[in-house]
Image (cartoon, helix red, strand yellow):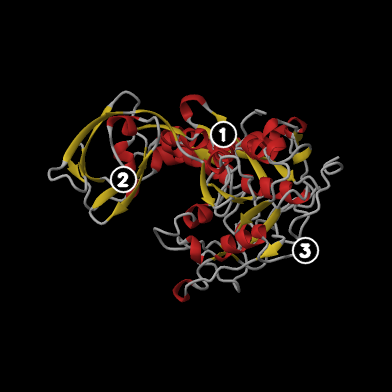
Amino acid sequence: MRLTPIRTAVSAAVLFALGLAAGPLIAQDNTTAPAAAPETPAANTPRTPDEIYSDLALFGEVFDRIRAQYVDVPDEKQLVHAALQGMLSSLDPHSNYIEPSDYDEVQEDTSGKFGGIGIEMQVEQDSIKVISPIDETPAAKIGILANDLIVEIDGVSVEGMTEQQAIDKIRGEVGTKVKLTIVREGVTEPLTFEVTRDIIASRAARLTMEDDVALIRLARFSEQAFVGIEKSINDAEKQLAGKPLKGIILDLRNNPGGLVDQAVSVSDAFLRQGAVVLTRGRDETVSSRYDAKPDDLDRKIADVPLVVLINGGSASAAEIVAGALQDHKRATLVGTRSFGKGSVQSIIPLGADGAMRMTIARYYTPANRSIQAAGIQPDIQILQDVPPELKGKDELLGEAALPGQIGGGTEQQATVGSSVYVPADPEKDTQLQYALKLIRGEVTDPAFPPKSDQATAGN
């Protein structure tokens, strides 16, 4: 199922939270009241054309005064773009103007594709460690291996580079070359590879097998999300070589969202029928209902128990999936309350002038819940064992704390924070270990397995 791409977004706070292993957490004081949103008149009285043109004339007068009298000669284009940004960002926390220089990055993030060489890497002391080359990419074909240490990029030492700086130097226009100097264990002299960049599809999903349980970590809802879920399920089946799959754990923790059509497709992978999500806006053309349909994939895993992990960083498209699977009683949700972003944004191209991101609708789960500023409550709340030095710093209030959030939810707004902490060591991951014990029958809870009402839900 492919729909018109409608990208959902999430606050910078959650994007920061995704860097838990590499940087500071976002502090959220539970006792601090959310910032007040601008008051909205009880009724918006339509303005007359004369009143509107009067305001535009005011804008023109201020613009001309700045051009004529500001202490230095201003950049008129920058002034106009700043006005556009102010106009859009005054609407809500997720509407904004996208500069032309940033638009390519937004498109890359949405598509999940970029010009690069195809390696997963991390900063390690004074080098960049290759975690793994991605199959069938230039890096894999030319012979770069896991655990290789990149010490120079195009003759420049990587010492002191951040991971993002290294990524920016390795990525580039398709067809161009990048030279890497690599130190490899067991090889005396450094190796030099000249790699030609190609189109790389970043992994949205990652499969880890825990004996006969498939753990699928979905990092984002780019255009690679459903493909990644489908491949993970098929790969799990291959690895089991005929043995039955005992359960699936879908990890949506700290997933900031992405494309609505991908949220629908991922939900559809686990559902046979019924509504996945409903969108409602002031413009009837953006009010829609998206349904799941029977297919080979959901038939294959129809009887496989499903647990979905969520936390305070699970937002937007991740909440669409969690809400759909919860309402249809297809999955048991484990973890802590999600972020609470219940709105949909559309990215509208403006030609050479970039684009605008604008909130166009609220979305509702199949049970007609708007989780705006409330989030989704897990069926089983499991807290992580947070290290003492991070306690009190691991929580986000979520959407409810954002100034200007649009409200309008059907659930009670969040008033306390929800943890975004996920330990790097799976053995110390309390939520993951509980989910595994649920599936293996080592612990029991009335919420697992849920009693499915697929025959009637979403009608």
Q: Quadrant of the C terminus?
A: top right
Q: Secondary structure at mark 1?
A: helix
When the figure is inspected, residue 208 is found, relative to residue 336, above or below; the finding is above
Q: Position of residue 27 (x, y in %)?
A: 50, 67
Tally of numbered tags: 3
Q: Is residue 141 left or right of residue 88?
A: left
User: Of callouts 1 and 2, which one flags the residue occurring earlier in the amino acid sequence?
Assistant: 2
Q: Residue at x 29, y 54 (%)?
A: 124
* Label 2 Cα neighbours within 10 Å, binned few <14 / some 14-19 / many ≥20: few
Please name the residue that numbered disc 2 is placed on: 165
Kindly identify which residue carries mark 1.
227
Above or below residue 349? Residue 44 is below
Q: Tell me the SS state at disc 2.
A: helix
Mark 3: amino acid: Pro
Name the residue tied to disc 3.
Answer: 446
Three-letter amino acid code at the position of disc 1: Val
Q: Which is more N-terminal, label 3 or label 2?
A: 2
Q: Residue furthest left?
A: 189
Mark closer to the observer (2, 3) = 3
Q: Earlier in the sequence, mark 1 or mark 3?
A: 1
176 or 433: nearer the viewer: 433
Front of the two marks 1 and 2: 1
Residue 414 lies left or right of residue 356; in this view the side is: right
Dividing the picture into quadrants, the one containing residue 5 is: top right
Question: Mark 1 or mark 3, which is nearer to you?
Answer: 3
- Determine whether label 1 and label 3 are within 8 Å by CB: no
What x and y, as percent, mark residue 367? 81, 48
Disc 3 crowd rating (10 Å Cα; few below 14, some 14-19, many 20+) is few
